[in-house]
Image (tube, rainbow, N blue to C red):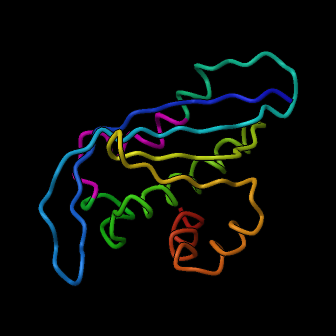
Amino acid sequence: MQEYRFKFYLNAIHSIEINNMMGDEHPHTWEIGIDAYKSDDSFVAFSDIEAEVEKVLAPFQDKIMNNVQPFDVINPTLENVSFYFMRKLEQLLMDNDWLMTKIEVSETPARTFVIDLKNPVYMSKLKSNKQEVIFKIVDKE
């Protein structure tokens, strides 16, 4: 199997609720890094998979995330944004014969949330926590 790292950029605004108070809207250039294995040694048409990922990101590009599903009902924290894109992109990649092993989402160069899908203990904890709400929303889409 061949391992690749993809990087995508999303320009989006959000505000998050902390202690029942909504913070100010502010912009980010989100960096989304994906580590994935190609399931076979066939030719990789990068532009095809990149175009598919860009379609997933498109509804949020240059938008206020709080106004776009699912973040109109889910607090768009760095963690929740990461879990949402993990679930969406993991399925997209699987449908195209790829296996995602890690996703890193940064809202600033100094702030990154990492989900390591190779760690079974970590992944089992995710499924039993609040991220399951995000997973259910994504699975209904």
Which corner quadrant of the image does residue 35 belong to? top right
Q: Which residue is drawn at 66% across and 50% down?
A: 91
Instruction: Residue 29: give x, y in percent of width and height.
Output: 30, 38
Residue numbers of the magenta segment: 53-65
**In the displayed structure image, the side of residue 104 where residue 75 appears, left or right:** left
Where is residue 9? Give x, y as percent.
39, 33
Please count the marks in the image.
0
For image coordinates 84% across by 34% down, the residue present is: 39
- In the drawing, does residue 46 fall left or right of residue 71? right
Q: Is residue 96 left or right of residue 46?
A: right
Q: Compared to 78, does 132 lie above or below? A: below
What secondary structure is the magenta-colored segment mainly?
Answer: helix
* 139 versus 130 height, above or below: above
Is 41 left or right of 117, judged from the image as shown? Answer: right
Q: In which quarter of the image is residue 115?
A: bottom right
| Residue 44 vertical placement versus 27 (above, below) | above
